[in-house]
Image (tube, rainbow, N blue to C red):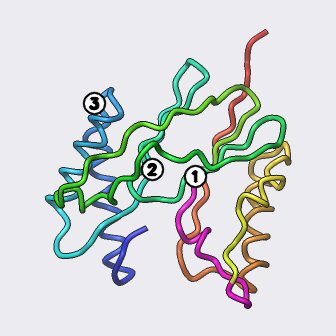
Amino acid sequence: MASGLPLAAVETAAVVLGAFREAAHDEPDLVRLGERRERSVARELEGEKFVTAVLAEVGSEYEAVFLNYGHPAPLVVRESGSAAFPQPPSFALPLGLGAHGSEGPRPCRVVFAPGDQLLLYTDGVTEARDPGGSSYPLGDRAGLLKEPDADRALEALREDLVRHAAGPRHDDAAMPLLRYHDHAG
């Protein structure tokens, strides 16, 4: 998530989360929220620190909207079992580097309907290597999320990641999962 020493990474994460929490209370527009977050992070971080991030918003119109700041794309798993990594219309620099003349990210809109799942994850997941040096094939493992119990599904994915890397990760490997349940009728 952040560059530098572990303590520096924790401090950077605290700045990013604080900027989000401060702006999210009074900024209903995702793009403007991202712009405020960029300004806050650029102001607070010193040196060459930066953070990749995805801002996600799920609305009531069967849609998810993403702003991608140089982070691996989220994994969308459809009710049918198909999986995709929605790519942004253009790529933006990570938070903290926007002052270098880059435009912010453009919104990436995807259908998010009942039965669909959205997996966000830190780069510790995609950077996990097996003993032969191959990256973790997250898209190929989407079937592990079919488990009806979300906690068990995430545990199965985590266990598979540990097996792939031949041991526990020393980097962060967070994986929040959002499931769309239809409560109608």
Which residue sits at x=30%, y=42%?
34
- Name the amino acid type tagged 2: Val
The image shows residue 171 at horizontal and vertical percentages of 54, 78
* Vertical comparison of 154 with 26: above or below: below
Name the N-terminal-most of marks 1 and 3.
3
Q: Do the residues labelled 3 and 2 touch (CB within 8 Å)?
A: no
Q: Which badge, 3 or 2, comes first in the chain's sequence?
A: 3
Residue that carries the numbered disc 2 in the rendered image: 54
Total labels drawn: 3
> What predominant SS class does the magenta segment belong to?
loop
- Give the secondary structure at mark 1: loop
Residue to which mark 1 is pinned: 120
3 or 2: mark nearer the eye? 2
* Label 3 sits on residue: 27
Mark 2 touches mark 1? (CB < 8 Å): yes
Task: Characterize the local packing of mark 3: few (<14), some (14-19) or many (20 or more) Cα atoms within 10 angstroms.
Answer: some
- Under circle 2, the secondary element is strand
Residue extent of the magenta highlight: 120-133
Please report the residue visible at 69 percent of the width from the left and 37 percent of the height from the top: 179
